Image: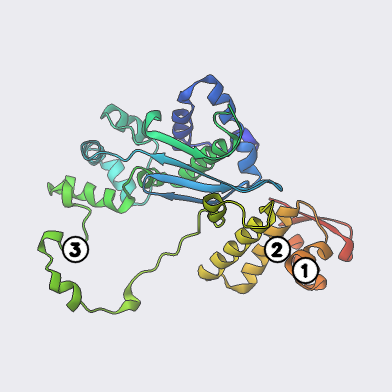
Amino acid sequence: MTDDQMTTTTWGQAWLATAAETGRVYAERLGRGPYYVARGALRNMEVTPGRASGVFLHGRQRSQPVSLDVEPLGDEEWERLVLALAAELRFSAAIADGTLPPEALPLLQEAGVDLVGSREGISETCRCTEAGAEPCRHIATLHHSLATVIDNDPFQLLVLRGRDASTLRASLRAARTGEDLATAGRSADAVAIEELEAGDLFSARGDLDTIPLAPRRVSDPAWLFEQLGEPPGIEDSTDLEKLIVRAADTAWKLAAGDGSEAADTELLLTELRAQRMSTPIKLAEALGWDPQVVADALDGLYSENAVMRMGEGLEAKYRSAS
């Protein structure tokens, strides 16, 4: 797959087409994004209601947090969206089955609903110094990374516009049964806020173990450097930021339940990508590990085609395959 073939579905193409509406020059500069996406330059990609964010980190350059803020769907537009989809049984069935067919896009446009949103409703944030470059390579990479996410799961467009798949499914059921769309997404156990009494907040009891936990990756582990500036006595915090990013990646692996072995492998690959090409000895020095342990781990990754290797033993040179 070449850099210009990364986005192949209707939904991802629609997002990039909207982003490119700024103008010809913008569209040309936006085309730089796939190069960096293919090289894994965007880390900690996250889509939350109204926002897509990540951290751009390529080579030995300083990490750069980037974000896109997207205008949410209004209530009237949401109702038109639900009614248009509910009128087509094939779309309601597909959505209930967990897919959002690309054929729904022109149907929604005919109903006056732009699920992707307008270009004016997208704002970009990057504090880089690429003067006069719009978009900068960091924003271009985020746009293409987001398009890839949307390709893989078009329902992420709903999240980006302030809604979600479960609310859409509930609203479709309500529309087809004549229920009130305004409350269709509410849980059956939910209590309206006007029905709550202050005393209930202190008398409520329940099993804390039943509360679902949803840990999320930190979007910018080194954000303090952006807020407070360089630490005292340090002229360049790049190495320290990389160390923090590696620590955050390891913490996420452990929190997600992958275990220390998976975390160590990811940490090793993260350090290898940071050095671009390295030997077990140099990697061991950076990580504080035994060189032979590093060499054995790299041999395992080599057998899995996760790294490339030149030479043998502790002096062999390795490079990440992704």
Residue nearest the observer in this picture, 198 or 264: 198
Residue 5 in the image: x percent, y percent?
Answer: 60, 35
Count neighbours of disc 2 (C-alpha within 10 A) and say few if under 14, some if 14 to 19, many if 20 or more.
many
Per the model, the C-alpha gap separating discs 2 and 3 is 46 Å
| Residue for point 66% across, 69% down | 264
Per the model, the C-alpha gap separating discs 2 and 1 is 8 Å
User: Would residue 305 be visible to someone looking at this image?
Assistant: no
Residue type at the position of mark 2: Leu
Count neighbours of disc 3 (C-alpha within 10 A) and say few if under 14, some if 14 to 19, many if 20 or more.
few
Given contact means CB atoms under 8 Å apart, are the residues at marks 2 and 3 in contact?
Answer: no
Quadrant placement of the N terminus: top right
Which numbered disc covers residue 294?
1
Which numbered disc covers residue 190?
3
Count neighbours of disc 1 (C-alpha within 10 A) and say few if under 14, some if 14 to 19, many if 20 or more.
many
Q: First in sequence, mark 2 or 3: give its number.
A: 3
Residue 143 in the image: x percent, y percent?
Answer: 51, 38
